[in-house]
């Protein structure tokens, strides 16, 4: 009996069993619902705005949220120092955040995947040059590099997307290159090369589909980093400019009022925190569900 118990315990703690447990993790429903809600609010923002997000009066400045003493349902989340409705500004800010996150990750994934495919498949001098550039990008802290690029390009939504792309493409390049180095040694790739298929066809039809899963995992994890980077740039005055109500910019404009009007800081901070948390939770689930052996993504 003791031997049987030891065998059962060993089986339960085996790597295969652990992977099955990871794959069986419940889908993060709350995180998914929140992200979908933010995307829908961002898309339908102009249709559901309760008030104008860009104008207000000093007569309505610093109104408290409805659950605080003196609050009103006319301004459910209160107003800022210029009398602008915070709920309306959060809705518009959600649209800006979604655009920057999706566009930044999409473009950086395309750039990084292209470089990783070429470096991993062609090898030789091309691989050495591309990977040394990639290593140099990865060696610089994201925020430091982002600040330098943002200072050079100036403020603006398009510039923020460019900066996030320039800062994050190297993560995709390094991941894809590692996957390609393994895939190119498989028998069906060797058979395609012997058959005389062009390299472009081999890359696009035989290798790229097989790196899609880890690429999806990396993209889901990078969305949160992109949001944090964009908000940090806006907070420091190098990202989205006024009067656009980007969440990081709302935090920057409200920090002087934190002692007597804390809701100005709390509301965008909660929205930003929940957005990043939801992206990371879903990214972790995707990693565990589809690629539990990618420990370097942890």
Image: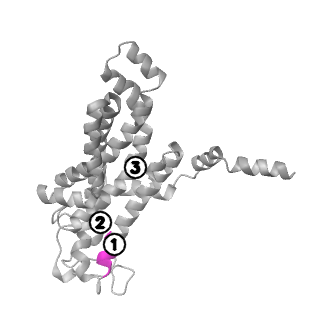
Contact check, label 1 and label 3, Cβ < 8 Å = no
Q: Is residue 263 magenta?
A: yes
Q: Earlier in the sequence, mark 1 or mark 2?
A: 2
Residue 30 can be seen, yes or no: yes
Q: Main secondary structure of the magenta part?
A: helix
Q: CA distance from mark 1 to mark 2?
A: 8 Å
User: Which residue is drawn at the image coordinates 17% and 59% (left, top)?
Assistant: 148
Label 3 sits on residue: 220
Q: Position of residue 206 (x, y in %)?
A: 40, 25
Position of 22 relative to 227 (above/below): above
Q: Earlier in the sequence, mark 3 or mark 2?
A: 2
Callout 2: 10 Å neighbours few (<14), some, many (20+)?
Answer: many
Mark 1: secondary structure: helix
Q: CA distance from mark 3 to mark 2?
A: 23 Å
Mark 2: secondary structure: helix
Stretch in magenta: 262-268
């Amino acid at each position: 009996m003791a031997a049987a118990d030891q065998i059962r315990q060993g089986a339960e703690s085996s790597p295969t069993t652990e992977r099955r447990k990871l794959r069986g993790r419940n889908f993060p429903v709350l995180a998914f619902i929140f992200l979908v809600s933010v995307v829908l609010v961002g898309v339908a923002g102009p249709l559901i705005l309760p008030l104008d997000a860009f104008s207000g009066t000093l007569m309505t400045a610093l109104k408290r949220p409805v659950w605080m003493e003196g609050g009103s349902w006319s301004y459910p989340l209160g107003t800022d120092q210029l009398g602008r409705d915070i709920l309306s500004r959060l809705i518009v800010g959600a649209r800006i955040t979604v655009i920057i996150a999706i566009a930044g990750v999409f473009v950086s994934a395309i750039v990084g995947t292209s470089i990783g495919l070429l470096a991993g498949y062609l090898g030789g001098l091309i691989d050495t040059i591309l990977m040394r550039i990639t290593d140099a990008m990865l060696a610089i802290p994201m925020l430091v590099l982002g600040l330098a690029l943002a200072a050079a390009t100036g403020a603006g939504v398009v510039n923020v997307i460019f900066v996030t792309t320039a800062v994050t493409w190297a993560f995709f390049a390094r991941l894809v290159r590692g996957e390609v180095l393994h895939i190119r040694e498989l028998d069906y790739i060797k058979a395609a090369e012997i058959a005389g298929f062009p390299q472009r066809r081999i890359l696009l039809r035989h290798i790229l589909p097989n790196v899609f899963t880890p690429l999806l995992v990396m993209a889901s994890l990078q969305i949160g980093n992109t949001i944090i980077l964009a908000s940090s740039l806006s907070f420091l005055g190098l990202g989205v400019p006024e009067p656009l109500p980007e969440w990081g910019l709302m935090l920057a404009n409200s920090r002087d009022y934190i002692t007597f009007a804390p809701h100005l800081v709390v509301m965008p901070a909660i929205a930003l925190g929940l957005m990043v948390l939801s992206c990371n939770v879903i990214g972790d689930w995707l990693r565990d569900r589809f690629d539990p052996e990618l420990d370097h993504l942890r």
